[in-house]
Image (spheres, rainbow, N blue to C red):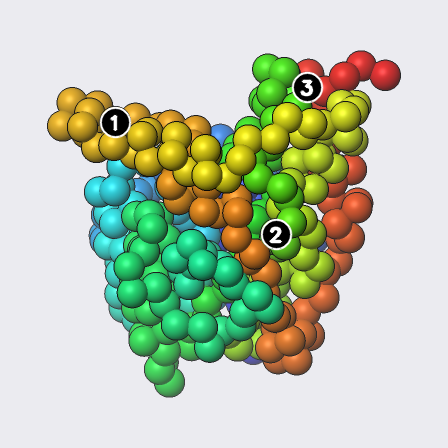
Amino acid sequence: MAKDHYLVIGGCGFLGQALCTQLLDRGNIVSIFDLRINGADPRLAEAIQGDITDPVQVSNACKNKTIVIHTASPIHGKATAIYFKVNVEGTRNVITACLEQGVSKLIFTSSASVTFNGEHLINANETVPYCKVHMDAYNESKAIAETEVLNANCEQLLTCAIRPSGIFGPKDAQGSFAIAESGKKGQWRLMVGNNQNLFDVTYVDNVAYAHILAADKIEWGSGIDGQPIFFWDYPKRLLHEMGYRNTQKIRLPNAVAFAIGALNDFISWVASPFATLHPTLTRFRVKFMDANRYYDISKAKKLLGYKPIVSLDEGFKRTANYWKEQGYGVAA
């Protein structure tokens, strides 16, 4: 029987690189498809440069592949049209290409926020319905894409969606990078609210591992650590590992932060015909920082045999050490 040939779409991204490393380390044949292929692992069978919004390029990339893991997505802070172009239309191209090229399995990186509308999610599982009205374009487009991936499941193509929550780790260009930047700018003293809400964060290697288990066992589950922490303990622990002390001593009340977020949203809307603004505080972000949002991962444990391969403590240490090597943090 021929060995599986994996295609990781977004293989040079934050999660994609972790996936490729784990697959290659266990001896799999792996190719990638990405807009940029700089720094691609030399062990890859192919590093294909291309655009997920081009159906021909996606179809060609899927040729002779048996398993596709689709991790590509724009980072937060982009225009609405970009999310729908990449996350929705791009994912449709992937589904079509998999069916055209005889791919047997498609694993899709979704988001734990496809069911988050600003209300608390306490020990939530896969039965929680999608939001009737989403609070941002990223998660709305992810929900649409996830639905289409799961609806494409058939005898020819087995599909699965993984919903990571709060991915962090070395080389993270979003969450942990923003925390490192806040420390460098002297903003580590401030937090919003009273830090009484629980939140799931997930080390990147654990998310990659959940995807691989899904590809092996092709079931639908959530890829998270199952160890919620208080929301502001995430930046606090990273900043502490980077040498900062007495963090989050200045507290901005949620009501004040929400008012600022509402004003920022209004300014962004007024400016939208002329420029795309990216304010730090928005109504969605304040709701996100204030809500309980943690998940029941029993289905992933039962069906995938999932359990974290890197502890949260170790994940924080590895991430902090990486950013210290990049010149962030307090010198010892």
Estimate the x, y position of residue 89 in percent, counting from the top left: 24, 54
The residue singled out by tag 1 in the image is 267
Cα distance between the residues tagged 2 and 1: 29 Å
Estimate the x, y position of residue 49 in percent, counting from the top left: 38, 39
In primary-sequence order, the first of circles 2 and 1 is: 2
Q: Identify the secondary structure beneath mark 3.
A: loop
- Label annotation for residue 197: 2
Marks 2 & 3, CB-CB < 8 Å contact: no
Residue at the location (52% across, 44% down)?
Answer: 289
The residue singled out by tag 3 in the image is 328
Q: Identify the secondary structure beneath mark 2.
A: loop
Q: Is residue 7 left or right of residue 182?
A: left
In primary-sequence order, the first of circles 3 and 1 is: 1
Q: Identify the secondary structure beneath mark 1.
A: helix
Q: Is residue 138 left or right of residue 202?
A: left
Residue at the location (33% across, 42% down)?
Answer: 50
Q: Is residue 117 left or right of residue 233?
A: left
Give the amino acid type for the residue marked by disc 1 in the picture. Ile
Estimate the x, y position of residue 183 in percent, counting from the top left: 65, 21
In primary-sequence order, the first of circles 2 and 3 is: 2
Q: Residues within 10 Å of mark 2 (few under 14, many from 20)?
A: some
Pick the quarter of the image with the N terminus: bottom right
